[in-house]
Image (cartoon, rainbow, N blue to C red):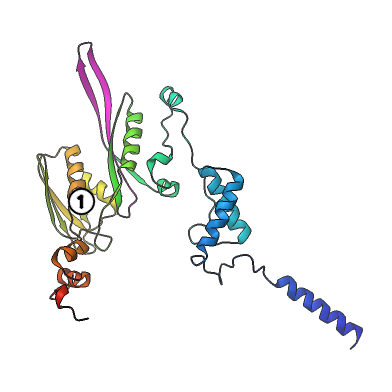
Amino acid sequence: MSAVTRVARTFTRSLAYQNLSDLSKFDPIYDDIEENSSVINLWKQQKAAELGTGTSAMSQAELIVRKEHNIVQQNMCEPLNLPKYPPPKALMEDNEDTEMFWTEDLQVPYEVFRRLAKKTLVVKRTVQMTRKGKIPSMYALVVVGNGNGSAGYGEGKSNETAKAVLFATRNAIKNMTHIPRYDDRTLYHDIEHKFKATKLLLWARRPGFGCRVAPIIHEIFECIGIHDVAGKIHGSRNPMNVIKTVFEALKTQRIPSDLAKARGLRLIDVNHTYYSGVKPTPVHRISR
């Protein structure tokens, strides 16, 4: 073997070793992140313990682990923006800044908080009569939702309109609940509900029908993520009562899983009965 051949082979082997990937790091194509989630969480906890405690430390640890181990996950490749924390309460009362801040007491992740839709539906001036005279204040009612089946409403009062809206928004986020939707677009069945002097009628509709309801109910359904529905309001049309009636009515829906448990049927039979016209099979008649 000539010297030129030896040099060529040595050079080729060195290039091959340089092109080999580090097997200790994740490969976005060949490695499954879900199967190795426990290992990734352990790395994050160890890195967060080195950085310290707190939400910011966890976010920084997550970014460091992704960068060091080449972890690529869908919708999580962008760097996280650290949350803004509010000033102390003493400064909050004196400060005129009414910016909406994320805090842990909201009970929602920061990434979810950033994507919430807010609708300020009611703002009015109220007056409290006392012996010393009239004490004016502002009242606000806000609806908040993620457009994917979760929404809530909140009320707030303050001397200023902006602060009243801020307090109402925070209360709405804390009161967010899951609202069942059929096919992620409409109701499971027609609803008739009465709250005080307001009577609400809602009807489920076919795909592409649209949201043909009162404007204030349309705003609520936009926050929830309901797109095909018709409705009518009878009696009092007070906006505050209408909003509360809508949320109470949506919570009264009976989903197929509840009907299956109550009637002793299988879930697939209940779905066929409601949407395909197939005769259900009782549980005690099922052959095993």
Residue 281 visible within the image: no
The quadrant in which the N terminus is found is: bottom right
Q: Quadrant of residue 29?
A: bottom right
Quadrant including the C terminus: bottom left
Q: Residue at horizontal 78%, vertical 78%?
A: 13
- Residue 58: x %, y % from top left: 53, 48
Task: Tell me which residue sits at (50%, 67%) in the image.
Answer: 35
Compared to residue 29, the image places residue 74 above or below, namely: above
Q: Identify the residue at horizontal 48%, vertical 65% (top origin).
A: 34
SS type, badge 1? helix
Compared to residue 46, the image places residue 25 above or below, namely below
Q: Judge left or right: residue 153 versus residue 277.
A: right
Give the residue at mark 1. 251
Membership of 164 in magenta stretch: no
The residue at the far bottom in this view is: 1
The amino acid pointed to by label 1 is: Lys
Residue 171 in the image: state x and y as whole percent: 32, 38
Part of the protein shown in magenta: 122-148
Going by the picture, which residue comes out furthest to the top? Answer: 132
- The reply to whether residue 284 is in sight is yes
Q: Position of residue 47 (x, y in %)?
A: 59, 51
Q: Quadrant of residue 2?
A: bottom right
Local packing at callout 1 (Cα closer than 10 Å; few below 14, some 14-19, many 20+) is few
Of residues 249 and 288, the one nearer the viewer is 288
Q: Is residue 35 left or right of residue 275?
A: right
Q: Is the stretch drawn in magenta largely helix, strand or loop? A: strand
Q: Nearer the viewer, residue 270 or 281?
A: 281
Q: Position of residue 287 (x, y in %)?
A: 19, 81
The residue lying toward the viewer, choosing from 258 and 213, is 258
